Amino acid sequence: MTRLRASFTASAVLARSFPLRRGGSAGAVATARDQGPREAGLRPILLVEPDPARRARLREALTLAGFPVEAVRNDALARQALAPHRPVPALVIAATGTRDTDGHALCEALRCDLRTAEVPVLLTAEEPGEEEVRLSRVVGADDLLPSALPPEAWVALVQLETGERHADGRRVSRAGGIALPMLLRGLLAGHRAGRLSLLHPDGHLAFSGQRVIEARLGALTGADAARALLRADARVQTVHIGPEATSTGLALSDTALGLAAPAASRPRAHRVPRLASLPTASIIPFAPSTGLRP
């Protein structure tokens, strides 16, 4: 029996655009770039990004890493890509808060459709604020990330989200694992908490609130362990996404770890006014059935 990942609220479902239909597995196989996806018929990554330059950069990076990508510029084209006769995507990356894209409405529709309810969804925003983070959680998105995140970090996150996914929050990477620096940068840019277990060397990191709050490498702990792991070509085997953890004293941001430029040197982002979301076709009450099987 498969447990639906998202909690379903009494929200509007875009029924005409996203018809209810079952099908699709919980995740697609993906590995590190030098050992990219090789399975025939691998489901595509659906990228919904209105900025043409950003869309092209991310599509190129994911394609070079071995992922098939369907990149579209707006919600209307995303609806076409999600039509019943099209493959269910392995992952959706969708911009929100722009004239042509409302990733929150798109994610809500995916979560309320049995066919796509378990597809991982990563949303993006120019400058994610508290209200956008809250709404992302309400609609069941896996995370909300800044649009300016570098393509290398996106590739690491896609490798993670399209690997083995378990009901207890574990994501397990395939083959040689995922390089720690770019994966950690992507995770710290988001709003989740969890624990990274390494394939090699033996050690772990815990993160919460966009900070590393615990680290161990052999006899090293704390900041010394965290920085040593980043220098050790560490590979991540498992990430356990879980409840927010409390720091015991360590709180290292991506900037403190040398993963990102200081805020003063980053290009200034321009917020695009948020317009109306996708139109509501009908309201369909939904409650997951205990007898549901894949």
Image (cartoon, rainbow, N blue to C red):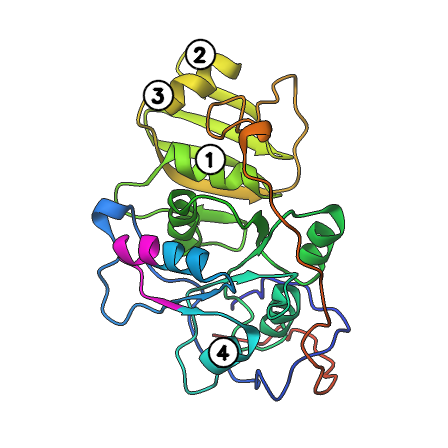
Q: Describe residue 174's horizontal placement relative to residue 252 as left or right.
A: left
Q: Does residue 221 appear in this view?
A: no
Residue 61 belongs to magenta span: yes
Q: Residues within 10 Å of mark 4 (few under 14, many from 20)?
A: few
* Whether residue 220 is situated above or below residue 283 in the rendered picture: above
Q: Dot 2 corresponds to which residue?
A: 220
Instruction: Tell which circle, 1 or 4, labels the residue nearer the N-terminal end.
Output: 4
Q: CA distance from mark 1 to mark 2?
A: 19 Å
Label 2 vs label 4: CA separation? Answer: 50 Å
Name the one closer to the observer, 175 or 154.
154
At label 1, the amino acid type is Leu
Circle 1 residues within 10 Å: few <14, some 14–19, many ≥20: many
Pick the front one: 126 or 249 = 126
Q: Residues within 10 Å of mark 3 (few under 14, many from 20)?
A: few
Q: Which residue is mark 4?
A: 77
The image's mark for residue 184 is 1
> For residue 231, which numbered disc appears in the image?
3
Instruction: Give how far apart the Cα atoms at labels 1 and 4 are.
Output: 32 Å
Secondary structure of the residue carrying tag 4 is helix
Find residue 197 and report its horizontal and vertical position in percent.
43, 33
User: In the image, what residue type sits under mark 4?
Assistant: Leu
Q: Is residue 159 above or below residue 178?
A: below
Whether residue 81 appears in this view of the structure is yes
Q: Which of the two discs, 2 and 4, sits closer to the camera?
A: 4
Q: Mark 1 or mark 2, which has the lower sequence index?
A: 1
The x and y percentages for residue 200 are 31, 29
Region rendered in magenta: 60-70
Pick whichever of labels 4 and 3 is earlier in the sequence.
Answer: 4
Q: Position of residue 279 (x, y in %)?
A: 70, 81
| Amino acid type assigned to the residue bearing label 3 in the image | Arg
